[in-house]
Amino acid sequence: MPLGFTQGALTAELGISRVAVNEIVNGRRSMTPATALRLAKAGTTPEFWLNGQISVDLYEAGHDEERLRTPRSVVTSGFELIGKRPAAPDGLFVLR
C-alpha cells in the first residue's frame, strides 16, 4: 500500500474512478498529466508520477523486439514529398 492509501481511499479522496485507479495500478492504463496532478495531492509531486510513467514507457519500448526490428512505414497517400532529403532541421519533409 504505497503512501498508505488503498485504491478505494484514493478514489474517494481524489475523485478518480475506482476503475481508473485499478487500471493504473495493474498497468492497463497510462498515467496522464491530469491524473498525476490529482495523485500529487496525496503528498507527492506530479513529476513523481509522470517520471514513473516515462520509465515504464521507455522500458516497454526498449524490450519490444518486434517494434525495434520493424522499420516504421510512412503513409504518404495524398501527399507528394518534395526532394530527397529532409527540408527542415527537425527532420520533417516538406509536403505539397
Image (tube, grey):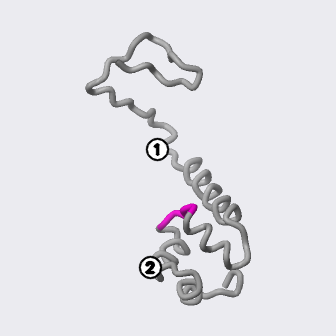
Pointer 1: what residue?
66
Q: In this picture, is 8 found above or below 28?
A: below
Relative horizontal placement of residue 7, taking residue 93 as reference (left or right): right
Name the chief secondary structure element in magenta: loop
Extent of the magenta region:
29-33
Which residue is found at the position 61% from the left and 67% from the top?
Answer: 36
Which quadrant would the N terminus be assigned to in this image? Answer: bottom right
Which numbered circle lies on residue 6?
none
Pointer 2: what residue?
19
Q: In this picture, is 8 found above or below 65?
A: below
Q: In this picture, is 35 found above or below 87?
A: below
Which residue is found at the position 44% from the left and 79% from the top?
Answer: 19
Which quadrant would the C terminus be assigned to in this image? Answer: top left
Relative horizontal placement of residue 62, taking residue 85 as reference (left or right): right
Asked which secondary structure carries label 2, the reply is helix
Amino acid type at image mark 2: Val
